[in-house]
Image: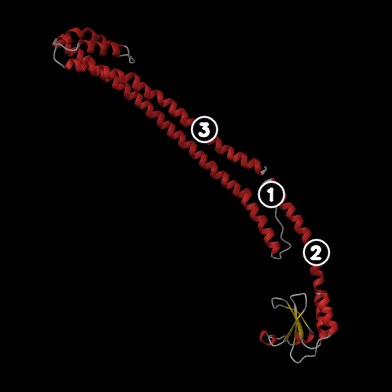
Amino acid sequence: MALRQEVTVGLGGLVLLQVALAVLAIALLGRMGPAVARILDENVRSEAAVEAMLGVLARPAPADAAGFRAALADARANVTEAGERPLLDTVTRHADGALAGDPGARRAAVEALQALGTLNRDSMARADAEAQRLALGGAWGAAILGTLALGLAILFARRLTARLERPLATLLHALSAHQAGHHTVRCPPTPGPAELQAVGRHINRLLDAAKAPAARGAERRPDLHRALGWLLDRQGGACLLEGADGERLAMSAAALADPPSAEALAGWAREPIPGTGLALRRAPGGPGPDQKSAGALTSGT
């Protein structure tokens, strides 16, 4: 699968889960809203009417008949439970006697109003339980979707690591090894995206192309080394060719017979070769330079 497709599939899955989580939250709030509105519109209104009527009956006769009948009419207009209408009929039958101060009528009306209040409170408790059930279900749904989103993100990150980061590290290792002089190292086939596999094949072709000149140079090195030794022998006496970093690149036969130590080499004459970072070292007391050989060293370099 191409890298673009893998990224699109992984990120698309994460986006879909986030959208599902948002839709779930909206649906949950949409279902909880009517439950709360039901409590406010239906039960709280009836409770307020019951409290108003009980307040009128709590005062001594003659009571506020107009306020009582207004509250009773409001309660009748807001019947939402099956058991409310018989209780309101009882209150209506005993309303005149209760307002006039009849103890029996007042007691019957108060008992019916108390039962009506209990009925509405029970209805409020059921609506509250339904809202809590919806909230709990929504919370679990959000938790499940969030866990799925987290798991998908971890899976996506691990897949990117396996199919992108590790193949890139393999390519970098091959290039670094080649730069360090290991010219036989190649990029192995990787299970990564098609783009990285193509990059690996191109790098291998470039490394193969770079290996051919290096191999030819390696074949010529022994001949070059022998030629340098021959030229140094022409200088006469013990001498050697020194690199810019002090490395001994080639030595004459006399120098090879008795290689100088680093301390002894410090006392040898040093003659830089123009145009290069190389220098010709001569042992003290040796013969002078052979101009033809020195010229050959200079021009050959």
Work out which residue is located at the far bottom of the displayed protein and give it. Answer: 285
User: Is residue 176 at least partly visible in the picture?
Assistant: yes
Mark 1–mark 2 contact, CB under 8 Å? no
Image coords of residue 227 (percent x, y): 83, 78
Mark 3 lies on a secondary structure that is helix
Residue denoted by label 1: 196
Residue denoted by label 2: 213
Please rate how many residues cluster around mark 3, counting C-alpha atoms within 10 Å: few if below 14, some from 14 to 19, many from 20: some
Of callouts 1 and 2, the N-terminal one: 1
Point 19% across, 15% down: residue: 56
Of callouts 3 and 2, the N-terminal one: 3
Tell me which amino acid carries mark 1: Leu
Question: Residue 280, located in which quarter of the rendered image?
Answer: bottom right
Of callouts 1 and 3, the N-terminal one: 3
Quadrant of the snapshot with the N terminus: top right
Q: CA distance from mark 1 to mark 2?
A: 27 Å
| Horizontal relation, residue 276 to residue 146: left or right | right
Mark 1–mark 3 contact, CB under 8 Å? no
Tell me which amino acid carries mark 2: Pro
Q: CA distance from mark 3 to mark 2?
A: 61 Å
Tell me which amino acid carries mark 3: Ala
Point 80% across, 89% down: residue: 288
Image coords of residue 145 (percent x, y): 49, 36
Point 46% across, 37% down: residue: 143
Q: Is residue 198 above or below residue 269?
A: above
Mark 1 lies on a secondary structure that is helix
Residue denoted by label 3: 20
Work out which residue is located at the far right of the displayed protein and give it. Answer: 292
User: Is residue 230 at least partly visible in the picture?
Assistant: no
Quadrant of the snapshot with the C terminus: bottom right
Point 71% across, 51% down: residue: 199
